[in-house]
Image: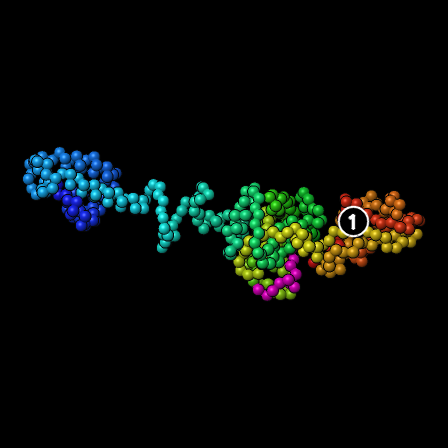
């Protein structure tokens, strides 16, 4: 029996891919045969091929046969075994350097794909994700800009119950609700609570009023995000045309509620509509959950990044201001006193109308005289836009006092649209 095997010298001048006379044909075919049968090439060489060569009989004295004296042509068996070892090592190297269809491997260097790879749904932190997986994370309002990675990580951490902190330079386009004021519903000067039921045009949270069919909603705050749940009607914000340019604006929000601009069809977030400078714009949301509402110039929705509460409150105060209930003495007559409100802490959109929330009775305020005692028996007569509050009491006898509206009621300066 003959075995056609090269000497080490012959193998050194050739590589495994150029040997047509190897057992089972070319080396690539040999390796493929092993792979298909599940046989490891190195194991076969060490355990079978070498043993087979060593056990050859001297029946064939051909130039490349194993002879009776232990020679292989003009070379001894040891030299031929070295050749087999070189072949085995080459097979091992090629096998190690190939990318496998299965099993764990570490791949180095830059690999450029001409087609996008398809990956399964991730289960651990370091696994790749698809575009659809990221898109389905809505309503995170991920922006198409350089804030994407930072904002996405922060929002995911907050919604998972963690604390997200990040600082970066922000433009007005990226900050808070942009043209919407109190889009995160953090300011609630009127103090609405529980199930909020509003008639058409009546305000609840600052800058948000009921639509033409009224509105009923509840709300909750989790990890700094206030979410409204609108069960009936709709919630509206009217935006001053003086704050708008003649351009496209994009409305975006989180939650299951649908939104619309200027009475166009309701739809899912985001929605892009055109605006005209100087013309007020109406934003409206119907039933469902709602949080982080934003209207911004352009045709893309950027991240909702909350303003500081102080800044949001100041924007709201241009339309509504809680006067904290204290009024100082203006003038008096024997039968009534006119108290004046403290100076407004901010300039408002228009001259405000003053009102006290809810029906007011004589027990909702105290008239405190100069000696610190409370004078009772006064009745509220009027509260006007000049900031004056008139209390009536026949022959009251008070010459120096102030009136304090108790915390159960609030005095507001109202300059809403």
Where residue 54 sits: x, y (%)?
A: 14, 35
Can residue 4 be seen here? The reply is yes
Range drawn in magenta: 237-247
Mark 1 surroundings: few (<14), some (14-19) or many (≥20) residues within 10 A: some
Where residue 316 sits: x, y (%)?
A: 68, 54
Residue underneath mark 1: 325
Can residue 381 be seen here? The reply is no
Residue 246 lies within the magenta run: yes
Quadrant that contains the N terminus = top left
Question: 46 left or right of 285?
Answer: left
Rendered view: 303 above or below 362:
below
Residue 383 lies within the magenta run: no
Question: 71 left or right of 168?
Answer: left
Question: 368 left or right of 81?
Answer: right
Q: Nearer the viewer, residue 9 or 133?
A: 9
Residue shown at 84% from the left, 45% from the top: 366
Residue shown at 83% from the left, 52% from the top: 328
Residue shown at 18% from the left, 37% from the top: 49
Where residue 357 sits: x, y (%)?
A: 76, 49
Question: 284 left or right of 79?
Answer: right
Residue shown at 32% from the left, 46% from the top: 99
């Amino acid at each position: 029996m003959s075995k056609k095997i090269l000497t080490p010298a012959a193998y050194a001048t050739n590589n495994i891919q150029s040997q047509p006379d190897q057992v089972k044909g070319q080396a690539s075919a040999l390796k493929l045969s092993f792979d298909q049968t599940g046989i490891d090439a190195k194991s076969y060489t060490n355990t079978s091929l070498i043993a087979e060569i060593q056990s050859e009989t001297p029946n064939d004295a051909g130039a490349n046969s194993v002879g009776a004296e232990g020679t292989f042509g003009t070379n001894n068996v040891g030299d031929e075994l070295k050749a087999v070892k070189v072949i085995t090592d080459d097979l091992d190297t090629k096998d190690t350097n190939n990318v496998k269809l299965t099993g764990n491997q570490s791949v180095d260097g830059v690999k450029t794909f001409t087609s996008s790879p398809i990956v399964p749904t991730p289960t651990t932190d370091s696994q790749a994700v698809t575009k659809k997986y990221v898109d389905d994370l809505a309503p995170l309002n991920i922006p198409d800009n350089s804030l994407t990675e930072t904002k996405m990580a922060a929002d995911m951490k907050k919604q998972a119950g963690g604390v997200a902190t990040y600082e970066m330079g922000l433009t007005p386009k990226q900050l808070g609700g942009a043209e919407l004021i109190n889009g995160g519903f953090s300011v609630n000067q009127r103090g609405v609570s529980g199930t909020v039921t509003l008639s058409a045009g009546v305000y609840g949270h600052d800058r948000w009023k009921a639509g033409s069919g009224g509105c009923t909603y509840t709300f909750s705050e989790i990890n700094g995000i206030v979410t409204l749940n609108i069960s009936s009607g709709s919630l509206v914000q009217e935006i001053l045309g003086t704050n708008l340019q003649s351009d496209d604006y994009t409305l975006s929000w989180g939650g299951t509620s649908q939104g619309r601009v200027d009475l166009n069809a309701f739809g899912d977030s985001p929605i892009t509509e055109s605006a005209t400078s100087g013309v007020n714009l109406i934003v409206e949301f119907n039933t469902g959950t709602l949080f982080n509402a934003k209207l911004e110039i352009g045709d893309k929705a950027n991240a909702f990044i909350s303003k500081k509460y102080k800044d949001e409150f100041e924007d709201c105060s241009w339309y509504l201001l809680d006067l904290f209930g204290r009024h100082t003495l203006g003038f008096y007559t024997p039968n009534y006193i006119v108290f004046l409100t403290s100076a407004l802490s901010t300039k408002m959109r228009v001259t405000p109308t003053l009102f006290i929330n809810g029906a007011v009775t004589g027990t909702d305020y105290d008239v405190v005289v100069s000696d610190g005692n409370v004078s009772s028996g006064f009745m509220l007569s009027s509260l006007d836009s000049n900031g004056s509050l008139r209390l009536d009491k026949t022959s009251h006898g008070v010459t120096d006092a102030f009136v304090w509206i108790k915390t159960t009621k609030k005095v507001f300066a109202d300059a809403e649209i």
